[in-house]
Amino acid sequence: MPARYCGNKVIGASFGCTVVVCILFAAAPVVITVCSLNTIGEKATPFVYIPVYILAIAIIIVYMMTTLTDPGVMPKRKITLEDKINNGQYQQLETIPLNPAPPTQRDIENNINYNEESAQEKVVQNQPLEAQVNQQRKIRATNHISAKFNQQPKCPTCGVERPPGSAHCSDCDHCVLFQDHHCPWMGTCIGLRNYVYFVVSTISTAIYCIIVVAFCGAGLYMGITFPDMTGKNNYIYCLVQGVFLVMAVFGFFFGVSMCCSHFSLVKSDFTTRQELRHRLNVHQTLDQTSQMNDKERKEFVQQLIAEDPILRTLDMKKYKDSGVRRMFYGRKLPILRNMTPKAAEEVAWRWTVVLGGFDDTQ
Ligand SMILES: [Zn+2]
Ligand SMILES: [Zn+2]
């Protein structure tokens, strides 16, 4: 569960996690500089280490931006009894009566809502099964965008009608838009709004680790080859350089592998979650669930862009690949947590359809 600061306004990694990461990145250049200056004495100048310091500060800033940026958390709805019964399992309509049993005293005590949707559902109960299913889907579509697509199931925990690509994170206990994965290093979900910062942090970690490997490798070589230079504390000097060298090698391979895998995911417009679970990406899901032809979908997307004050300021033709466009434009999504669940669902669907490349016909 990520930490929440400023009265729930800011979600981020736990304080301890943040401190450890900052100390690790800030301490490395200081230790390397002190050790190396000790070795080569007056001939060395601390300015040699400026790239390490700059990158260390840059990494800490990008780390903070990733952890403190809301990943695209959707506000929860109140779970109704209908949600519990339906929960996207349309095939159960044959066995579960559309008109649920009237609320018991316990339901009322538990504050389970009987909203107006249930009243509408009662109307369709005498129709043939297929008509009932279609009618049910229309009723469940709480906004005009999702009504254009065959429904995704509501989140059983939050009750939100989430768009494709979104997923519920059990660590954060929220649905997150374009959820990529929950990052234990960052202590937060990586979603639509903080994905670009996350990718930048993997690139900068890889570059930083190459520089640290070079400095520590050279320092260790000097310590082993010229033990007199470091005096009687030679073994401590070599140990410190060796430890940072091993950590930097690990960091380098970790950063490079993360960086390469995310470049490939961005190129193909998949999230880590979709890739690992062999799911369709958002574009493919929208394709499958929509009944629109090419012309209709282009017009539909244009209408969605025109409706949104932020989307209409973005140049959609700037990035050819929808994955790249989602990465760069995703951070401009307004914070959904502060909206009502209904308004948030509408904005979430609009951004998913537009950034999901729905109008990029093959
Ligand atoms: Zn959820
Ligand atoms: Zn999470």
Image: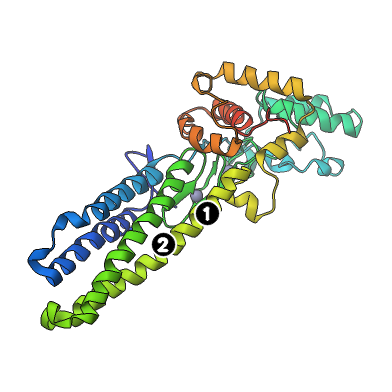
**Marking on residue 260:** 1
Residue drawn where x is 83% and y is 26% of the image: 124
Q: Is residue 161 above or below residue 298?
A: below
Q: Which residue is mark 2?
A: 252
Callout 1 crowding tier (Cα within 10 Å): few <14, some 14–19, many ≥20:
some
**Label 2 amino acid?**
Phe
Q: Quadrant of the C terminus?
A: top right
Disc tally is: 2
Residue 302 shown left or right of residue 43 in the figure: right
**Label 1 amino acid?**
Cys
Q: Is residue 103 visible?
A: no
Q: Is residue 298 visible?
A: yes
Residue drawn where x is 26% and y is 49% of the image: 54
Q: To which quarter of the image does residue 93 belong? A: top right
Per the model, the C-alpha gap separating discs 2 and 1 is 12 Å
**Marking on residue 202:** none
Which secondary structure lies at badge 2? helix
Which secondary structure lies at badge 1? helix
Residue furthest left as drawn: 42
Q: To which quarter of the image does residue 343 belong? A: top right
Percent coordinates x, y for residue 149 in the rendering: 73, 30
Q: Is mark 1 within 8 Å of ligand 2?
A: no
Residue 196 shown left or right of residue 132 in the figure: left
Q: Nearer the viewer, residue 201 or 85?
A: 201
Residue drawn where x is 44% and y is 39% of the image: 70
